[in-house]
Structure formats: structure tokens, C-alpha cells
Amino acid sequence: DADVTQTPRNRITKTGKRIMLECSQTKGHDRMYWYRQDPGLGLRLIYYSFDVKDINKGEISDGYSVSRQAQAKFSLSLESAIPNQTALYFCATRGASGYEQYFGPGTRLTVT
Amino acid sequence: LAKTTQPISMDSYEGQEVNITCSHNNIATNDYITWYQQFPSQGPRFIIQGYKTKVTNEVASLFIPADRKSSTLSLPRVSLSDTAVYYCLVGGGYGGSQGNLIFGKGTKLSVKP
């Protein structure tokens, strides 16, 4: 089984809808991240969390919110989706004593 | 923020050594340099990380000059399966700010037979 899982893998939604992307990990890592990837722009950090009580904004947090429900779960929400949020979203984890990030398989989100 | 600049694309042939350079002029004292590999429709995968001088593992080497304003990922004897996008990441080291995790735009490496 994969160490970092994301659900859904693909989602099409309409402008104005609320949507939640979920990430779960079995690595026991404290640190979790959400990135978005757009063609030609690489990966950009949206939010990150060091533990359940810690949430931090990344480079592009506007229009997004997150929830760290447990050490193993980190959810990304779009309260009112807009077309320019169409992108590939990745969740990642990292251990407190390590430096490598482990990425999930990604969620492809399309907002029409 | 320590932004990075990489070539957009590179071409190579099987068996050749490939060197991809990343510029990070504003790197902070506590920042590490990390490289990731990404295949289509997959999440990035860690390749190598370093702070200064040279680091080598079973798949790549990383060269970092004394001023740390650039770094070079070296892939020895590439194969077709090395065709991927390679990202340079600066930040996130011990004591460094997690909020300063900046990915470059990536270098698309195409390996030809």
C-alpha cells in the first residue's frame, strides 16, 4: 500500500462549489504539505503543517484553507472554487529528523 | 525568498553524463539544496540533497560551490528511463524556514536512444 494517499484522484467541479481534497499518510511523519502544480510553473506551496496544532501559509494560500484532523490526515479545501484553481494538487510528508519529502500521487482538479 | 532558475529543457543520449545547473542567488544560510525527479502523472521523488561541496549517492552527484549560489545535479550514464522533469528545491533544512520551500520551474530532460 502507498505511504501517502490522496482522494479523489480526479475531480471535476463547477465554479462556486466547495470542494475538499484529502491526504492520508502511514509514514508517521509530523510534517505535511500541500502543493499545486501548473504547466510551466513547477510546484508551489499552498499550506504546510508541522503537527496537529500547527498550520502555516505557503506561497499561494489565498482561496484555500486546510485542516489537520490528525497526525496522519491533512485536508485542503476550496471554499468557492474558481477556474484558475484548475491544477494538479500534491500532498507531501516529511519526518522531523529527515529532509526528504514523500509525495502522494496527486489529485487532478478541474473547475469549469 | 530564495528563488531558483533552471534551464527549461535539455536533451541527451543514452550513456552520456548529464549536468543540470540551478541558480539560487538568494539562498539563506540555513537552506539546503534538494533535487527531485518527476515522471508524468506522478508525484516528485527525492534524488539527492546537499548543503555544500559534493554529495554522491547511488543515482546522482550534487556539486555545490563555496558561495552556494548555484548547484549542479550530475546524472552519470543516463538511460531512457531518466527522461523526466528535474526540480531544484532550496530551503527546508534544519533550522530553515519551511515557508521558504521554493521549487524551480523544473528542467525537462529528454534522453534519446
Image (tube, rainbow, N blue to C red):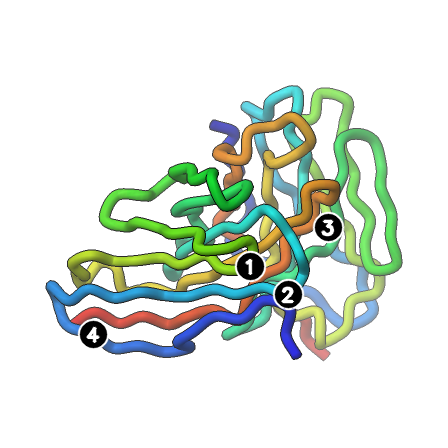
Q: Quadrant of residue B78?
A: bottom right
Which amino acid type corresponds to the residue marked 4 in the rendered image?
Thr
Which amino acid type corresponds to the residue marked 3 in the rendered image?
Asn
Foreground tag (4 vs 2): 2
- The answer to whether residue B82 is left or right of residue A6 is right
Q: In this view, does B20 lie above or below A107?
A: above
Foreground tag (1 vs 3): 1
- Near mark 1 (Cα within 10 A), the count class, few <14, some 14-19 or many ≥20, is many
Instruction: Report, in whole angstroms, how far the alpha carbon at label 1 lies from the one at label 2.
Output: 7 Å
* Count of picture labels: 4
Instruction: Report, in whole angstroms, how far the alpha carbon at label 1 lies from the one at label 3.
Output: 37 Å
Q: Where is residue A67 in the image (x, y as percent from the top left)?
A: 38, 52
- Looking at the rendered structure, the secondary structure element under dot 2 is loop
Q: In the rendered image, which residue does mark 4 sit on? A: A13
Q: In the rendered image, which residue does mark 1 sit on? A: A72
Tell me which residue sits at (54%, 23%) in the image: B26
Which amino acid type corresponds to the residue marked 2 in the rendered image?
Thr
Q: Which chain carries label 3?
A: B
The quadrant of the picture occupied by the C terminus of chain A is: bottom left
Of the numbered discs in the image, which one, if any, rests on residue B19? 3
Foreground tag (3 vs 2): 2
Which amino acid type corresponds to the residue marked 1 in the rendered image?
Ala
Tell me which numbered mark, 1 or 2, is placed earlier along the sequence.
Answer: 2
- Near mark 4 (Cα within 10 A), the count class, few <14, some 14-19 or many ≥20, is some
Tell me which residue sits at (72%, 42%) in the image: B72
